[in-house]
Amino acid sequence: MSELPQSATIPTAQAADKDTAMPGAATPRKKRRAAIATQPEERIQRSLFGEILDWMLAPLLLLWPMSIAITYLIAQSIANQPFDRALEDSVTVLAQQVSELNGKVVARLPVSARDLLRADDVDNIYYKISGPRGEFVEGDNDMSLPPPDDDKQNIGTVQFRNDILHGSDVRIAYVQVDLRRTQAQRMAAPNTPKLATVQVGETLEKRAQLANEIIKGVILPQFIILPVALALVWFALSRGLSPLSELQQRIRARRPDDLSPIDSRQVPEEISPLVRSLNDMLTRLSQTIVIQKRFIADAAHQMKTPLAGMRMQSELALRQSDPVDVRRSLEQLAKSSESATRLVNQLLSLARAENQLPQISSFVPIELSELARNVVQDWVQMSFTQRIDLGFEQPGHPIMISGNPLMLREMLSNLLDNALHYTPPEGSVTVRARSDEAAGLAILEVEDTGPGIAVSERQHVFERFYRILGTPSSGSGLGLAIVREIAQQHHAEVELSHNPHCEDPKHPGCLFRVTLQLTARTNFIDDIG
């Protein structure tokens, strides 16, 4: 093998340096940034305590400003009521002093009464008396007239309105006074009343102060109650979630090999479904560990014999000098290695079958007769070697089932392996696929002309590593266990009986029948092609 000249590597390194020096080349730092940018974002782990607290406090913090706004409106309404009654009394007393004298509207209001009317240390008091045509009679001329009202029922009734006077908001009470005092005056002009307008207004300082006092009386206790409520909520949540902490401590205090179920009676009702799901998982995990331990123990036990035989044959071959004896020992070593290989393969097949979860959703449509024909073709060469007639009876129509193709091929291969191992030379093995449309069943049969199996042994041959005493053929006792495991995953039934076509009493043969659920062919016409 010739080495690459050292000079040939220099331009490559220089070119690499030039590439890294180029402005457009990606530097290692940029590459790291790009790699970090492409990594999936980690999901932020949320706290159940914080989640519940958020859902409790968020509505509270949202409703609290709304309650303040509603309280302010209610406080204003409460504050307006006493001051409106005072305004109503003032405008009523003032209206009683208004009369008509010589065709003019006059107000018989003494100076002391005017001073008393305007006596207020907080608010500014305004009043105005207007004639029937809106002419100014007395008071503050800056006050605007109320909007016209044609409803005669409002005459003499005190009404209220809000207005702006001298740049300040004012509350005004006004009343329309009928100047026709006598009955004769009313009879003389029944449809044209002479109305004078009397208005008394005041600014809103006292109202605002009272409303603020009401709000302070309501809001300030809330500032004291709200932290106390938050503390109580925090304490209640801590107490309510304490069973989770206790459950966590009990789980952490367990031994690593303790897979016993958790007592769901010691947890709140809301956590019971979680505990039951965890117990189900622990049960499945315990079963898996038991299967793995049993598999390891059985594998270690079964591997001792072929490995010990291989070691013995190899040591015997090393001690012998005769080529014939050495060859005989090597042939025995080859047979032992073949037996060990077959045992390992079957152990792996059994482990794969036991760990295969029976999920119906992962099954696919399968044409049973086509699958059986392909498996039989794989065993034709072995049947020629052992001088056994291997045949396949294919039906005239497709047989559709749903299952795992790999596992079903493994099941049929183990049935054929078992039949070919126990059938003597010049015997026959037949694989048959048929269906029972009326019962909705797909049937797979493997029959041989071997020595057969006694009725008392038929239930035991499906156990792992079970072999019938006196059996001439060597085997591991795993093939039929694999068949049963795969059949159970497909909800199938395995039956064992004598071969009804055998006439030799010394070789009654065996008939293995696997019954699966038939799937309607109309659902898979496209798959059949």
Image (cartoon, rainbow, N blue to C red):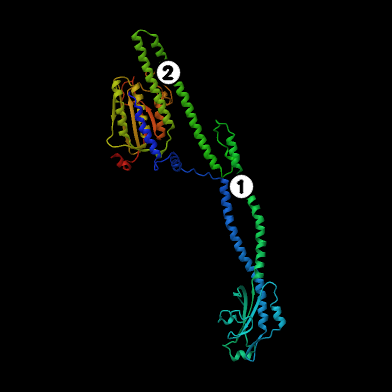
Q: Quadrant of residue 425?
A: top left
Query: What kind of residue is marked 2?
Result: Leu
**Is 307 above or below relative to 64?**
above
349 or 231: nearer the viewer: 231
Q: Nearer the viewer, residue 111 or 336?
A: 111
**Residue 320 location, quadrant:** top left
Q: CA distance from mark 2 to mark 1?
A: 64 Å
Q: Is residue 212 left or right of residue 385?
A: right
What amino acid is labelled 1 in the image?
Answer: Leu
In this rendering, the answer to whether 51 lies above or below 135 is: above
Q: Position of residue 51 (x, y in %)?
A: 56, 48
The residue labelled by disc 1 is 237
Q: Is residue 157 visible to us here?
A: no
Q: Position of residue 186 (x, y in %)?
A: 61, 89
For image coordinates 46% across by 24% down, the residue present is: 298
- The residue pinned by badge 2 equals 307
Pick whichever of labels 2 and 1 is earlier in the sequence: 1
Give the structural element (helix, strand or loop) at label 2.
Answer: helix
Q: Name the residue located 50 percent from the left edge and 33 percent from the top edge.
A: 285
Residue positioned 28% across, 34% down in the render = 395
Quadrant hosting residue 1 = top left
In the image, taking residue 222 as reference, residue 384 lies left or right, namely left
For the C terminus, give its image quadrant: top left
Disc 2 crowd, CA 10 A, few/some/many (<14, 14-19, 20+)? some
Would you say the residues marked 2 and 1 are in contact, meaning their CB atoms lie under 8 Å apart? no
